[in-house]
């Protein structure tokens, strides 16, 4: 079960690195297309999306600490923290932006958290 937890947490980490890139570095090109925004909408939303991207980067960083920290207990704590934050952010995003966010963010995070806690 621990391998499954690590694989799922790694998947959540990669998803959030991708979201970070879409909302910051790639927003004017790929990000605009993924979010279905016109050039005019994207120009208005760019500052807010960049800020949101930073938060997704922080979530990815917390999960990365879970993999990289040498102390297993500290790494596990960072992983749990990161997964809980991702799950809550996904629920909020589903309620306020688009239901798809629940399946892209919350479901993988909850599965990873469950696998980690059962390991």
Image (cartoon, grey):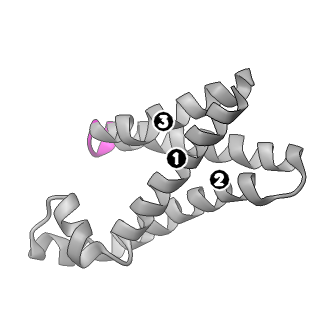
Q: Quadrant of residue 8?
A: top right
Q: Residue at x 43, y 36 (%)?
A: 91
Q: Is residue 94 above or below residue 67?
A: above
Q: Which residues are magenta?
A: 95-99
Position of the N terminus, as image quadrant, is top right
Task: Residue at 28% x, 36% y: name it.
Answer: 99
Q: Which mark is residue 63?
A: 2
- Give neighbour class at mark 1: few <14, some 14-19, many 20+ (Cα, 10 Å): many
Marks 3/2 in contact by CB < 8 Å: the verdict is no
Q: Are marks 2 and 1 in contact (CB under 8 Å)?
A: yes
Residue holding disc 3: 108
Where is residue 119 drawn, in percent x and y? Answer: 75, 25
Residue 30 % position (x, y): 23, 69
What separation in Å lies between label 3 and label 2 (alpha carbons)? 13 Å
Q: Position of residue 75 (x, y in %)?
A: 80, 49
Vertical relation: 15 (above or below) 26 = above
The residue at which mark 1 appears reads as 12
| Residue at horizontal 73 percent and vertical 52 percent from the top | 66
Q: CA distance from mark 2 to mark 1?
A: 8 Å
């Amino acid at each position: 079960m621990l391998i499954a937890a690590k694989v799922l947490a790694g998947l959540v980490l990669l998803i959030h690195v991708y979201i970070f890139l879409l909302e910051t570095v790639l927003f004017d090109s790929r990000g605009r297309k993924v979010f279905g925004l016109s050039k005019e909408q994207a120009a208005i939303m760019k500052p807010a999306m960049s800020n949101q991207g930073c938060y997704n980067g922080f979530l990815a960083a917390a999960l990365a600490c879970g993999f990289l920290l040498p102390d297993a207990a500290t790494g596990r704590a960072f992983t749990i923290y990161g997964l809980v934050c991702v799950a809550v952010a996904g629920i909020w995003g589903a309620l306020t932006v688009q239901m798809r966010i629940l399946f892209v963010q919350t479901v993988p995070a909850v599965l990873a958290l469950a696998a980690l806690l059962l390991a």
